[in-house]
Amino acid sequence: MRIPILKLHEYLLITIQVELDDQTALQFQEDLLNKIHDTGAKGVVIDLTSVDMIDSFIAKVLGDVVRMSKLMGAQVVLTGIQPAVAITLIDLGISMREVPTALDLEQGLDKLQLELEG
Amino acid sequence: MDIQSCVEVCNEWDIVSARQLGRNMAKELGFGNVDQARITTAISELARNIYLYAGSGKICLEPVEQMGRKGLRIIAVDNGPGIRDIRKVMEDGYTTSGGLGAGLPGVKRLMDEFTIDSTINSGTEILATKWLR
């Protein structure tokens, strides 16, 4: 299964709407980095509104792809983390401290714009 | 009410099956959104441990009732190498896989009751229960 990556001006938008198995998550990591390379995108929003569970593996894959993208020169913001997911992640002991987040897609794009301009 | 449902865990896709089963059972039993996420995540972590450390095993789920309380019990069983030092794996931050799983302390925090029984060279059994509030 492949997760679609949309290009909007200098941004890439991804909304994860499938149950993430390990292969899909790792494939997405690779696809996103290739897409950043091909498009020269400066900012990426990964929207997690439809994701109802993040376990330690998915958290690691997401955290890694944020750091990998940064190495390539693109900023990533995770948006739309559900209350139940936030509670579960902290219970698990995963804080995702260095990962930029925003409440929703709109605020995520605002955040990227501020960072890219500033 | 002791209908047990089990999922054999041998590969990464079985982890998804196990947590989908957990999500459905938790929903049916009347758990709220947050506890559904806790139960599903705990199952995912336990199934991953089986896959990573034992190679194969199974996750069973059963509705439980005790002194008027209802809940859901996760039973994670494998015939893997066993855990040499249970006290150590129950410490936060301990890992032998380079951080692929959040580890057992995380699962314990997600659930209300947690017991672990492990014998070297014979396997591990973990029981974790969440009670309806």
Image (tube, coloured by chain):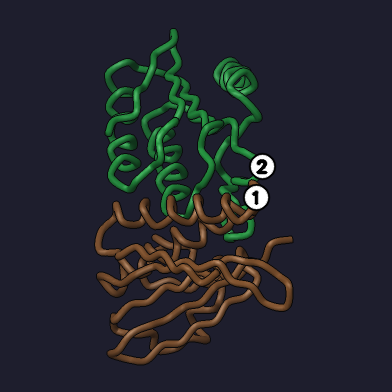
Chain colored brown: B
Q: Residue at x 67, y 77 (%)?
A: B66
The residue tagged 2 is A83
Which x, y percent locates residue B24?
50, 50
**Residue A89 seen in this snapshot:** no
Is mark 1 in CB contact (under 8 Å) with mark 2?
A: yes
Q: Chain of mark 2?
A: A
Chain colored green: A
Quadrant of the frame with the C terminus of chain B:
bottom right
Is disc 2 on the same chain as disc 1? no
Res B116 label? none
Under mark 2, the amino acid is: Pro
Q: Residue at x 31, y 67 (%)?
A: B52
Numbered disc in front, either 1 or 2: 1
Q: Residues within 10 Å of mark 2 (few under 14, many from 20)?
A: few
Res B34 label? 1
